[in-house]
Amino acid sequence: MGYFNSLLQRKFKDVAGKRYETIARDYREFLLTEEETVVPEVLSILMPLDYFVKEIPPQLYETLSSYERAKVTLVYIVDMEVIRIVADSLDEKAIAEFRRKREAFGEDLLNRVITSLEGAGLTVTSRMFAGEKFDNILELMKGYDLIAVSKKYGTLTTEIAPLSSVTLKLAQMARVPIIVY
């Protein structure tokens, strides 16, 4: 803890006295180390999208544009669990129409977000596939420096639950910085 350790010793030497070592040891996890104060270089950003992500705030584009050399990968996932539920209650024609509408929505959303991100000066790639939203993103996030995910990703939010359960689990399990918008 080098710098912060010496800063705390100077600041609290008369207040804590000999107890400083105990305090520093007990509260070590709340103090930033010198390595933690270094801002990591972000060259790749994963941005998952789905049916519940209707709009993206303009402030997110401004924030992401601060990573000048970063490449943003947009991923739209059509949830196979929803397709299975629909398949249990509808015929093949209705299932195909449902899936076609979800994919059309995804294409439109991807195109709008691509246009906005490119307008902010970022390089963008995109892909769409059917799968399991949480599991697929959890696997994909391993190859990225930053994740930007909507608070509504996976399900709608409520007053009681301001974050979707999928977003909350992703934020808890992410090993890279995550922006929840």
Image (spheres, rainbow, N blue to C red):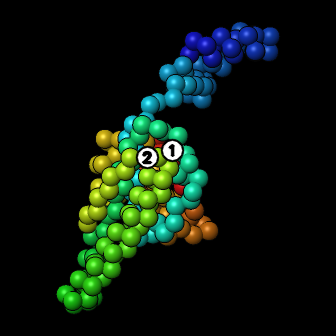
Q: Secondary structure at mark 1?
A: helix
Please identify the residue farthest to the right as the structure is shown: 14
Please identify the residue farthest to the left as the structure is shown: 92
Look at the picture and state if 126 lies above or below 161: above
Q: Which amino acid, mark 1?
A: Ser
Residue 144 location in percent, x, y? 35, 41
In the shown orientation, is residue 138 left or right of residue 4? left
Which sits in the foreground, 140 or 126?
126
Dots 1, 2 in contact, CB < 8 A: yes
Q: Residue visible at 21% across and 89% down?
A: 93
Residue 171 location in percent, x, y? 46, 49
Q: Residue visible at 56% across and 16% down?
A: 1
Residue 4 location in percent, x, y? 63, 17
Q: Secondary structure at mark 2?
A: loop
Q: Which mark is residue 84?
A: none
Task: Work out which quarter of the rendered image holds the C terminus and state it.
Answer: bottom right
Give the labeled residue for mark 2. Answer: 122
Rounded to the nearest whole Å, what is the CA distance between mark 1 and mark 2?
6 Å
Q: Residue visible at 60% across and 25% down?
A: 31
Which sits in the foreground, 70 or 165?
70
Give the labeled residue for mark 1. Answer: 65
Look at the picture and state if 14 lies above or below 180: above
Mark 2 neighbour class, 10 Å CA radius: few under 14, some 14 to 19, many 20 or more: many
Look at the picture and state if 180 lies above or below 36: below
Q: Residue visible at 56% across and 48% down?
A: 62
Q: Quadrant of residue 50?
A: bottom left
